[in-house]
Image (cartoon, rainbow, N blue to C red):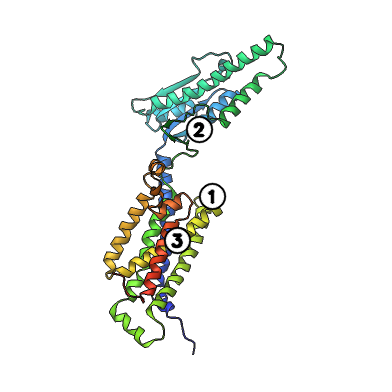
Amino acid sequence: MNRQPAQLFRLKKEWKSVICWLLAPIILTVFVMKTFGILQGESRVPIALIVEDSSILATQLAEEIEKNEMLSVRRLELDDALHKLKQHELDSVFVIREGYGESVLANRRYGLIEAYFSNRSFAYPAISETIMSLAQQDISRSKAAGVIQQLFLDYGMEDQWDYEEIIQKSIEKQRKESLLHTSFSYGKQTGQPDEKPMELLNSRAVWAFFTIIAAFFLFDWMIKESRPSMQVRWLYTSTSFKSHAIRMLGLYSLLTVLSDVLALFVFHFVLQETVTLSFIFPMLAFRVTLNLFAFLLAVVYRQLFMYYITGIAVALLLTVTGGAIVPLDALSRRWEWVEILSPVRSLMTTTIPIGWLVLLMLLLAAWMVKGGKRIA
């Protein structure tokens, strides 16, 4: 007769809920990120851009305006754009007039861009300043190129660089170097420039929050299996409850790791996140830490409701202290121990939560030595 492992009995009985909690963090993360992306897209200021000039400078200016993440730029005809402006479908309308390129080359600053707005154009002042600053860059480059060309002529080097080469060189210089960047220092502390802009919502943080909650609902089997009515059966078997619990921990850990592999594929193909080895190992360490924490906390509790409430509270606490909602860069530079407050912090910074892992492994060893009884 084939004997079925005891670990599969509960998994057979609750396989629907297990699959639900394994997939819930992935589904909820995709939903939140996609919804946030849609809301962020809808929050952009709608403007119309009409390009009447066919010069390279006019084309480059239009491209720079369209790159602005705060603007939703529409290419329309002037009559259609003005009609939509009257209907308050657009915040404002900007026209790059014919002869823009020639005016820039001639260092003429006025009459380059024509703007239209209504009494509901709340963002017009800021947008107009932004667009004029981009046009001012073209004028400044043109003026600088004219000065450089004149210097070449004065020193008999007119064949060195032409006007277009000077302009392209200035653009490359601006892209490669942060010309307006300034670093500050106070006392012995030196401020380091951030290479990446702060994200309003991070997919890792969202996934970590839902994963912590799901882990507590997954490991509720520990409370169900340790009820007095269930403990009686271990008196008539050769397997102790401790051995059964450790095997269940291993089985559920394997299932959660498989769900994490699926999450990596979803992050890459659905959310267009870059997945590297430097992120995979911290993610695995985060999963092991989370499973051990949920398991050991279930050892302490007797009531499922209080265990669930604690799980939700812990998820909020670890997410906030991990810097997923409020950045902790300033605090971590001042107090380095802030980095070890939460395993979520390690996931965000792609490091291994060694302190958490060591502490949880010691607690697991203490529970096993104690004989599988509850730790008071």
Which residue in the rendered view is the most extreme toward the top? 154
Residue at mark 3 to residue at mark 2: CA–CA distance: 41 Å
Q: Amino acid at mark 3?
A: Arg
- Residue nearer the viewer, 68 or 262: 262
Residue bearing the label numbered 1: 274
Mark 3 or 2, nearer chain start: 2
Task: For marks 1 and 3, give the one nearer the viewer.
Answer: 3
Q: Residues within 10 Å of mark 1 (few under 14, many from 20)?
A: few
Name the mark on residue 287: 3
State the mark number for residue 66.
2
Q: Residue at x 40, y 52 (%)?
A: 340
Which one is in front in this view, the residue at disc 3 or the one at disc 2?
3
Q: Is residue 3 left or right of residue 230?
A: right
- Is disc 2 surrounded by few (<14), some (14 to 19) or many (20+) residues within 10 Å? some
Q: Nearest the camera: 102 or 249?
A: 249
Quadrant of the image occupied by residue 102: top right
- Name the secondary structure under disc 3: helix
Residues at marks 1 and 2, CA–CA distance in whole angstroms = 25 Å
Q: Amino acid at mark 1?
A: Thr
